[in-house]
């Protein structure tokens, strides 16, 4: 469930903390990268709680932008994932144009 976003992500993706916090959030990942992204997340464990990923994000403007993200999972004592934190940055050199869906 979504618990926090910085102001840039709130404004870019139209996230409303009053309506969206506490509910599942689907990152706007380009479908071409979704399988690779999900596979990377599934490998997170208490022993290896972090990953770095370069993925394309579908922006509201219709442009897919390459972004570098660092994801870190938090686990409870039973080894169950309780939280996922992500920090991302745009990679301007890899910006590509795509049609808005």
Image (cartoon, rainbow, N blue to C red):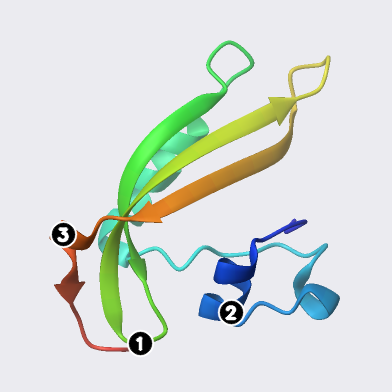
Q: Is residue 48 above or below residue 63?
A: above
User: Looking at the picture, how far across and down is residue 21, in whole percent?
Assistant: 79, 66
Please name the residue shown 40% across and 38% down the image: 39
User: Looking at the picture, how far across and down is residue 100, in whole percent?
Assistant: 30, 89
Look at discs 1 and 2 and give the one toward the viewer. 2
Q: Which residue is mark 3?
A: 94
Q: Residues within 10 Å of mark 2 (few under 14, many from 20)?
A: few
Which residue lies most toward the top here?
47
Mark 1 to mark 3 CA distance (whole Å): 16 Å
For mark 3, give the secondary structure: helix
User: Looking at the picture, how far across and down is residue 3, in whole percent?
Assistant: 77, 56
Q: Is residue 49 above or below residue 35?
A: above
Q: Quick check: marks 1 and 2 in contact, CB under 8 Å?
A: no
Of residue 61 and residue 75, the one placed in the foreground of this image is: 61
Return the disc, 2 or 3, that comes first in the chain's sequence: 2
Mark 2 to mark 3 CA distance (whole Å): 22 Å
Q: Which residue is mark 1?
A: 61
């Amino acid at each position: 469930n979504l618990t926090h976003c910085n102001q840039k992500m709130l404004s870019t993706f139209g996230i409303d903390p009053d309506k969206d916090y506490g509910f599942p959030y689907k990152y706007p990942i380009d479908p071409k990268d979704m399988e690779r992204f999900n596979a990377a997340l599934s490998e997170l464990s208490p022993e290896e709680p972090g990953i770095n990923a370069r993925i394309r994000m579908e922006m509201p403007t219709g442009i897919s932008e390459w972004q570098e993200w660092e994801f870190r999972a938090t686990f409870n004592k039973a080894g169950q994932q309780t939280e996922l934190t992500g920090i991302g940055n745009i990679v301007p050199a890899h910006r590509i144009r795509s049609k808005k869906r």
